[in-house]
Amino acid sequence: QVQLQESGPGLVKPSQTLSLTCTVSGGSITTINYYWSWIRQPPGKGQEWMGTISYGGSTYYSPSLKSRTSISRDTSKNQFTLQLRSVTPEDTAVYYCAGLRRGYFSNPLTTFQKTSDYAYWGRGTQVTVSS
């Protein structure tokens, strides 16, 4: 059974970099056709897809966050990470890691932003941006 767990600091200062790690157990992040994403939900708002890293290491980002976001992975630890630079209080949210399997897609943005399609979810971790 695939399980995901987010970890990282719960408080980040404005202008700094938010860094989170997702540890995957019960399956390999390199298994073909699996995609691993970061999704966040600000208080009182809906879920927002941030970006995705594929089983082969390709990355895809939300246009609104692309300039500030980096997703990477450590296959030896079966982990993938999120870095969000130059954070502001508007970045305060619960951050989730999630996974899905798909053998084909035509448009990455429309595919990955549909959060209801994700089969695997972490519990989420609260991150507050404040000085």
Image (cartoon, rainbow, N blue to C red):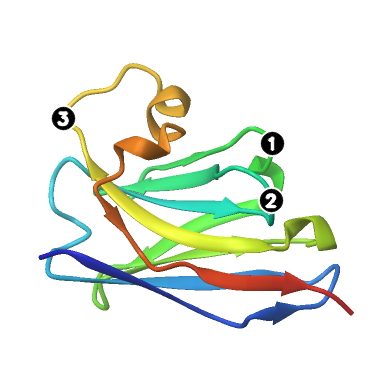
- The percent position of residue 82, horizontal first and vertical second, equals 52, 63
Seen as rendered, the residue at the extreme front is: 44
N-terminal of the pair, mark 2 or mark 1, is 2
> In the picture provided, is 33 more to the left or to the right than 23?
left
**Amino acid type shown at disc 3:** Gly
Which quarter of the image is occupied by the C terminus?
bottom right
Above or below — where is 72 with respect to 18? above
Label 1 neighbour load within 10 Å: few <14, some 14-19, many 20+: few
> In the picture provided, is 51 more to the left or to the right than 37?
right
Label 2 neighbour load within 10 Å: few <14, some 14-19, many 20+: few
**Amino acid type shown at disc 2:** Gly
Which of the 4 quarters of the picture holds residue 107? top left
Comparing labels 2 and 1, the label whose residue is closer to the camera: 2
N-terminal of the pair, mark 1 or mark 3, is 1
Residue holding disc 3? 103
Q: How far apart are marks 1 and 3 (CA)?
A: 26 Å
